[in-house]
Image (cartoon, coloured by chain):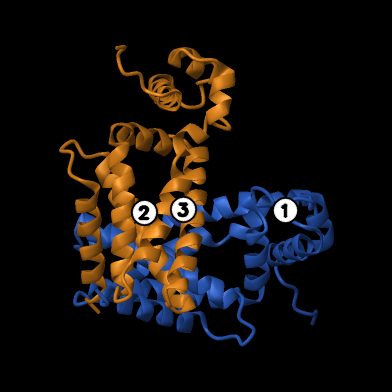
Chain colours: A blue, B orange
Amino acid sequence: MGRWQPDARTRLQEAALALYGERGYEETTVAEIAERAGLTKRTFFRYFADKREVLFWGSELLEQHMVAAIEAAPASASALDMIGAALDAAAERFEEVREFAGMRHRIIASSHELQERELIKAASMAAAMTAALRARGLGDTAAAIAARMCLIIMQFAYGQWAGDADKTPFRQFARDALAQLREIAASG
Amino acid sequence: MGRWQPDARTRLQEAALALYGERGYEETTVAEIAERAGLTKRTFFRYFADKREVLFWGSELLEQHMVAAIEAAPASASALDMIGAALDAAAERFEEVREFAGMRHRIIASSHELQERELIKAASMAAAMTAALRARGLGDTAAAIAARMCLIIMQFAYGQWAGDADKTPFRQFARDALAQLREIAASG
C-alpha cells in the first residue's frame, strides 16, 4: 500500500504558500508552483484561475456555509444567535486549514493587491449574509448591520487566530470579540 | 464687485464629477476635466495626484477629524460615546459636501478600482481610530472592535444618506444604524 498522497489541489496550495513565503508573492510564477508540487502548469490551471486564487480558494464555500448556518438557525434565534451560528460555521471551515492560516495571513498582509482582493471577498460575504438575514425576517437596516457585525468579528478573530502560537480555537477568539462588541454596545 | 467664483479645487471636482457621470469614470481624461473647469492640466495636478484622487480628496481630513473627536471626548465618555463623537465629526464633514455625495457614491459603486480604493481608505481610518481609542484607555481588542463598529455604521449611513432624496441629515442615519446595532447586540 502506497503512502497517502495529498491531492493535487492541496499539493499546489502547499507549494504556492511555501514559495510566496520564501521569495515573495510577486516574484513567484505559476510554473514554479507547479514544478515545486511535481505537477504541470496545465494541472495548476485546472484548479486555480491564477496564482492569486490559490490564496482565496474556499472563500465561496465559506460564504455558503455561513449563509446556510443563518438559514438553518431555529425559528426562535435572535439576530445575535444567527451571527453566532455563522461564526461557528466559519470556525469549522477555518480549523480545517489551520496549518496554512498563519502563512496565508502574512502573505496577504504583504501585498496591496491581495488585501484589496480580500476586501472584495468580504463585501460579497456581507451582501450574501444581509440577504440571508432579511429572509429570516430582519428589517433592511438590521440585516445589513448584523451582517457587517458578523464580518468585523470574523476578520478580527481571524487575525488573532492566524497569528496565535498556542493553537487557541478560532471559536474562542470569535466569542471574545463578540463579547467585547456587546459590552461596547451596552456602554452608552 | 465680481460674482463669487468657487476656488480651483471645487471647480475641478465639479467638472470631474459631471464628466464621470456623463461618460463614465474610465473614459474621462484629466485633460477633459481641466478643460471643463476652464483650467489647465498643470493646475489639476497641483491639487490632485490623479483622476481617482478627485473622488477621495478630503478623506485624510475626515480621518483627522474623527480621531480628534475621540481625543477630545470628555474623560467620562464610554466607548459608545466616543464612537458617537467620531460619527458626529464625520457628519459635519459630510454635510459640507452633500451636493457631491450622491453622484460620488454612484461613481464609486460603478468601478471595482474605485471600490477597492475606498476599502483601503476605510482600513486606514480603522487603524487610526483604533490607535486613538487605545490612547483613551480601551484594551487592544475593545479598541479594534469599537473602531470597526464606528466604520460600519459610517459606511452604512453614508450609503443611505448619499442616496436620500429627502435631505435627511447624515447624523440621523448614523444614529438609527447605531441604535440597530445596539439592539442586535442586546438580542442574544
Percent position of residue A180, x then y: 37, 79
On the rendered image, what quadrant is the C terminus of chain B found in? bottom left
Pointer 3 chain: B
Query: Disc 3, disc 1: CB below 8 Å?
Result: no
Query: Disc 2, disc 3: CB below 8 Å?
Result: no
What residue type is disc 3 on? Ala
Q: Is residue A131 above or below residue B61?
A: below
Residue found 69% across the figure and 52% down from its top: A51
* Distance Cα–Cα, label 3 vs label 1: 34 Å
Write down the residue under mark 3.
B122
On the rendered image, what quadrant is the N terminus of chain B found in? top left
Find residue A179 and report its image quarter: bottom left
Question: Total label count?
Answer: 3
Percent position of residue B42, x then y: 59, 20
Please determine if labels 2 and 3 lie on a single subunit.
no
What residue type is disc 2 on? Ala
Decide which of tag 2 and tag 1 comes sooner along the chain.
Answer: 1
Crowding around mark 2 (Cα neighbors within 10 Å: few <14, some 14 to 19, many 20+) is: some
Res A127 label = 2
State the residue in front, A17 or A64: A17
Is B172 situated left or right of A61 in this image? left
Please determine if labels 3 and 1 lie on a single subunit.
no
Residue found 51% across the figure and 26% down from its top: B26
Label 1 residue SS: helix
What residue type is disc 1 on? Phe
Percent position of residue A138, x then y: 20, 62
